[in-house]
Image (cartoon, rainbow, N blue to C red):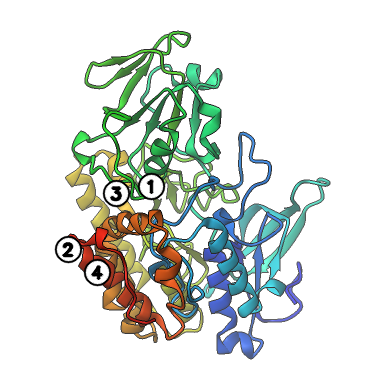
Amino acid sequence: MFEPTPTSNRKRIAVIGAGPAGLVALKTLIATREYQDKRWEVIAFEQRTDIGGIWLPDPSPGDQPQTPLYNSLTTNLPHPIMAFRDFPFPHSTPLYPKASVVLQYLQDYVKGFHLHPYIRFSTYVTSIKPYSLGTTGVSWNIATKSYPPISNEEVTWANVNTIVIANGRHGCPFYPSNIDNFDVWKGVGKVSHSMTYREPTSFRDKSVIVVGNGPSALDISPELVGIASRVYRSIRKSSTTSGITTRGQPQDEEAITICRPIREFGDVKEGVVMLDDGKILSGVDHVIFATGYDISTPFLGPPVVNEMPNRERAYPMPDNWLINSGQHLFPLTKHMIPTPKHLPLGSFFVLGLPRPIVPFPFIEIQCHLVTAILSGKVEMDIEGENSAVHAMMEEMLRRFDNRSDLAAREWHRMDGERQFDYRVEIANLTDVDPNTMIPEWQRRVYARKLELRKAWKEIEKKGEDKRVTKDVGKGGEHEWVELMDRILEEIDKGEQNRGWTKTTD
């Protein structure tokens, strides 16, 4: 039992968050011999009443929802690639499941690995502060309060040896900072973030600009068509309009007008918006910024990290060990392990920072590295790693003409196959089999995820989806791989309209 005050000499490990990252961290930690031999104590703090993170709906979202989950959300990746490697989705699951199916999957994961006893729900972490520095690590004091607040009573969990940050990347909306009169429009309610979006009817008969080119923007903009009077999508590069949304629906150029980034908000009543190419839009009623999220660690502060994101710096201030620019946390080796001398190896980990990634298996392999380090199976030359990441940052700054904001934005980016190469690298540091954790088919499917998503929507429109997936997966993962390969083969042959068959019937 993990108590506020230590009752033994066991290593005390605290996980912050019980979304997907926190759950796989818990599962991996309690599976170790060290935990089984009662040499470790493990706890997770979760401010909400249940597990799931962003997959758990917020019944009263308001202006500050606890999740960006909108009503119509389905996954933008096929579930065989997004599942934890040792816990597949049930057989016959739709290839691109609804959010409620993913939540049930996570609840089944918790039950399957008996994780509930390790999670302290309705507990808000107010601060994590270094308590003492020693030759073998740093001790931490964690302060918590009940959530929602019932009283000001605070509990201090003392002498924690290891902190695992697993609070996700979708809690603090990011807005561009270079748009004139932004605060004026936001102040009168004509600007919002996709985090607060739930369904399209509140925008009926309005002229709406959706800013962004990521999954949320590509979901929300077509959903507004036919309800809003006009829909624009504002993106940095007009050449990126592929005509495919994450729902796989063609974007009608007449229904969704692609435009350049917003430079300035003009007259509020007239709805005037100036773009960076000189064009002026008028009659705009609302702007939805689907522009992503800042890295948020509100429970940390000096000397560990700056309290508020600092977009002007790539390196920490002299009195801080780490810098949080909102877009990157630095310096970390392997995108998860601090390299400053004040944070000895094994005292602090951050999960799931890179993007865009397939998050569940990505974080799963990170957790194997966490346990390998904590058990002493993996050692690192932290001083050498620190020099290496600083040299990498110097190179990145040269690439971006010493613009810290651009270097920060790119620091954790893992486009294309980089995320799979990273997972192989991490697996090779541990005792897990890279061929099992990162099978070759995942690279192939991920590279064609948009085509596959579009084809799947066609299957759903024809009412073939349940028949196509019936009993698939009963015989193992290979059945899902064979199904996805058949769909991709029919795309290559141009045979999407000939109907769909199953060889496993």
Judge the density around disc 3: few (<14), some (14-19), many (≥20) Cα neighbours within 10 Å: some
In this rendering, the label closer to the viewer, 3 or 2: 2
The amino acid on which the numbered mark 2 sits, given as a three-letter code, is Asp
Q: Residue at x 57, y 84 (%)?
A: 31
Q: Which residue is mark 2?
A: 492
Q: CA distance from mark 2 to mark 1?
A: 24 Å
- Nearer-the-camera pick, 132 or 7: 7
Q: Residue at x 47, y 21 (%)?
A: 206
The amino acid on which the numbered mark 3 sits, given as a three-letter code, is Glu
Tell me where residue 62 appears, x and y as whole percent: 64, 35
Q: Give residue 444's mark.
A: 4
Instruction: Indicate which disc, 3 or 2, sits on the residue closer to the N terminus.
Output: 3
Q: Which residue is mark 1?
A: 215
Q: Residue 486's quadrant in the figure?
A: bottom left
Q: Marks 3 and 2: CB-CB under 8 Å? A: no
Instruction: Indicate which disc, 4 or 3, sits on the residue closer to the N terminus.
Output: 3
In this rendering, the label closer to the viewer, 4 or 3: 4
Q: Find numbered disc 2 in the image and state the secondary structure of the residue it sits on.
A: helix
Q: Which residue is mark 3?
A: 410
The amino acid on which the numbered mark 4 sits, given as a three-letter code, is Arg
